[in-house]
Image (spheres, rainbow, N blue to C red):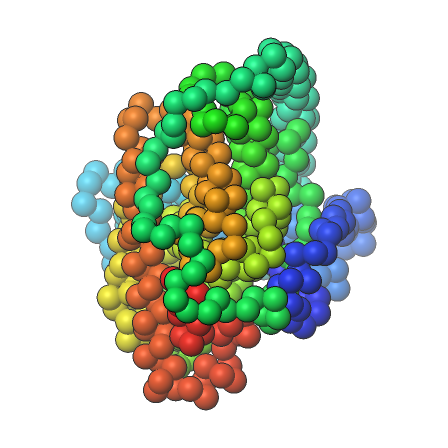
Amino acid sequence: RRRQASPSGQGVRLKGWFSRQSSSSPTTFCTCAERGFWALRGSGWEQLHDYAERESGYTMRAQIEVIPCKICGDKSSGIHYGVITCEGCKGFFRRSQQNNASYSCPRQRNCLIDRTNRNRCQHCRLQKCLALGMSRDAVKFGRMSKKQRDSLYAEVQKHQQRLQEQRQQQSGEAEALVRVYNSSISNSLSNLNNETSSTYANGHIIDLPKSEGYYSVDSGQPSPDQSGLDITGIKQIKQEPIYDLTSVPNLFTYSPFNNGQLAPGITMTEIDRIAQNIIKSHLETCQYTMEELHQLAWQTHTYEEIKAYQSKSREALWQQCAIQITHAIQYVVEFAKRITGFMELCQNDQILLLKSGCLEVVLVRMCRAFNPLNNTVLFEGKYGGMQMFKALGSDDLVNEAFDFAKNLCSLQLTEEEIALFSSAVLISPDRAWLIEPRKVQKLQEKIYFALQHVIQKNHLDDETLAKLIAKIPTITAVCNLHGEKLQVFKQSHPDIVNTLFPPLYKELFNPDCATVCK
């Protein structure tokens, strides 16, 4: 389920935003599974539809959804046209019947239909729908025969039992991993205790780009005052116990440092602590988990929906995109807040780094929600291509963003690598007006050390880190192009921007503050 920003409060000063302590409250899910099946059978199955409405969809429909889609195996959403299917197969069958479509198979009429390739052959998909009993004349659930109802009930019970067994097995595996992990960490740290006072004297793993006057805050212009900066519209991200080191298998593949050269003043224990903090923070502040993104991978906007986007006015689509970007930025702000080293920077530098780097992190995170197989990106719950954004009148910006996402996807980064690269992009010492650029640089260097270690562990290609660093100018160029397009749009539609765009978006990308944002 998509994690929403909680609707708490109006805008707050970013200064106060950082000073608040994060509070965590467990999420409670209310279901009526314990009231469900037998109660319904005793009181009459014909009343199921009304009962389901009264219980807000958490009754029999929720239990039926444990059965995968009979057509493609994706998560089902109920009984449609007489068969348990997902929303995608329901919509496909409805369109095929409305249009009296006649499909042909380019192969042998025996194509495999599953979640990943169900869109490749419409003929075989339709034949499977018909073979499994889908029909426009199918009776509704409440009119099923007793034999059909009993059969369905037995299948639900079977799937529920299977899910319970899987959860128990995963729980046992997680406990075993925790024991192994804790033992490994304990041994590694004890071995490192004697090494923490000694560091390697051989420079950096990479040469970070430096410009003349890199550390100078005296550029001939007065530094903008950040102490009273009012960035409104930021909402507290709802803190849910979504990720726990004891329940995320991917984190157990992370191994502490035991090799490599470290810059003076940096210990392996510190690098390991920073890396795990950043990875955990990233996982906790993504809008979608990878599992959710996989489930949505083939949920694409229909032809009619794409046409609707294309027919929108330029102002309406700009506003829509601004809202989506702002929502993503709120998660980036929360990500930054959870990075230990980031919170140790002065507030002026925290604000400047966020103002200049938040959109760059959104662009990096975009690769998680980008499908390079069909060049589509997740937008408002479904995937769509570049043609969806025609009404923006900014084809070059859209093309650049899509090209970057596709190129970044080609590196096949893991969640660990995306987390560390995102933080390295955000915590950049070459931002203008930083008060403590050396402190920012030291933190970024530690992040790059961690990123190098993870890349060496995951990739045979030892040039992956260099390829990532080479993409930073492209990230900056795309974000600068966004600023230019926004400025042009604001000149022609100032009232739209001033009255309808989210306050946080206006504050971050105000063209009048361009010197700060570059």
Q: At 36% from the left edge and 52% from the top edge, which residue is drawn?
A: 213
Q: At 58% from the left edge and 19% from the top edge, which residue is drawn?
A: 196
Residue 419 appears at what percent x and percent y? Answer: 48, 41
Residue 34 appears at what percent x and percent y? Answer: 79, 44
Looking at the picture, tell me which residue is in the foreground, 361 or 407. Answer: 361
Residue 129 appears at what percent x and percent y? Answer: 40, 49
Looking at the picture, tell me which residue is in the foreground, 173 or 500. Answer: 500
Decide if residue 69 is on the left or right side of residue 151: left
Looking at the picture, tell me which residue is in the foreground, 135 or 328. Answer: 328
Decide if residue 2 is on the left or right side of residue 371: right
Q: At 36% from the left edge and 77% from the top edge, which residue is drawn?
A: 487
| The C terminus - image quarter | bottom left
* 116 shown above or below 31: above
Q: At 38% from the left edge and 30% from the top edge, which residue is drawn?
A: 204
Residue 422 appears at what percent x and percent y? Answer: 45, 45
Residue 47 visible to an observer of this rendering: no
